[in-house]
Amino acid sequence: MTKKSKGLWMAIIGASFWGGSGAAAQYLFANTSMTAIWLVTVRLLFGGGIMLLIGLARHRDQIKAILSNKRDIAILVIFAFLGNFNSQLTYMLAVQASNASTATVIQYLSPVLIILWLAFRNREWPRRIDVISIIFALVGTFLLVTGGRLDALTITPNALMWGSSAALAASIYTLAPRSLLARYDTITVCGMAMFLGGLCISPNLFLTPVPHFTGLEWLDLIYIVVFGTMMAYTFFLGSVKYISPALTGMLSAFEPLVATFLTVTLLGTKLTSITLLGSFLIIFGILIESIPFKRIKIHH
């Protein structure tokens, strides 16, 4: 398997785990008294804690190296708070303020922000294929999660604010840790960032009553923590070692794809021809993004 193929599969698996956790979280929101901030606190503390323990067992020297380097600490803090913690909290708040479909559509603007930022930083015009693939992916995502109906989106000011913040945070967590992941173990870096982010909102575990869960709902929560958090971040962020941040961002399209599939098969939502078309457009947009075209330099 080539490095690029490995990166592609890692991003797809990570995004798919996220999609599964989105469906699981939506189920818990609908059937329990769980709040978004309580869920995010549990995800970061326990998911990050497990990853940090693994990092301590395998790469204790890397943790010491990160903590002894001021630049690495600064990047870790940015990744932990502006990227990791912020992306999870703002996305869940967007879901709480509207619905999962609305939040997913708005958050998926992150690949646009990534490509525009890279174009600005590298003084390059975005490739034509980048623009085309983004259009396909955005249109596909819209069709997938809305069924092509504009009136299916209920965008309140709070939903727009939190969703836009989630898109920005998703761009940051894709871009920010790249230099750390190039030199350190993915699980170690992600575990440190997640646990650090969880610590800042840990009082919620003591201030908020634990929701009443059934056995199935506890399994749901365990899936969110282990697969939808620990494994998802490890695979998705690890992919930037092998593929570009822009392509990694594009592959996040698998999140709404998997979330919709699980919602249909497990929660009874009906698939229409429009949502199938949306799925095709997303996959097509991802595939054409990998076509090698030259970029055009910006001349002064």
Image (tube, grey):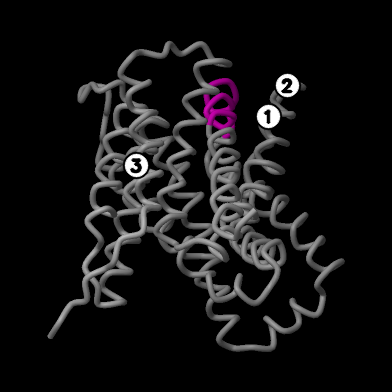
89 magenta-colored: no
**Residue bearing mark 2:** 216
Look at the magenta stretch and give its main secondary structure. helix
Q: Residue at x 42, y 53 (%)?
A: 249
Q: Which mark is residue 220?
A: 1
Of the residues tagged 2 and 3, which is closer to the observer? 3
Specify start and end residues of the magenta stretch as a single range.
23-34
Q: Secondary structure at mark 2?
A: helix
Between 195 and 283, the residue placed more toward the observer is 283
**Where does label 3 land, which residue?**
285
Is residue 223 depicted above or below 246 in this figure?
above
The residues bearing labels 2 and 3 have C-alpha atoms spaced at a distance of: 36 Å
User: In the rendering, at what x and y percent does residue 268 appear?
Assistant: 51, 11
In terms of depth relative to the viewer, which is nearer, 149 or 163? 149
Q: Position of residue 213 (x, y in %)?
A: 70, 25
Label 1 sits on a secondary structure element that is: helix
Left or right, 117 with respect to 69, comes to left
Q: Nearer the viewer, mark 3 or mark 1?
A: 3
Name the residue at 54% across, 37% down.
35
For the residues labelled 2 and 1, say whether their Cβ atoms are less than 8 Å apart: yes
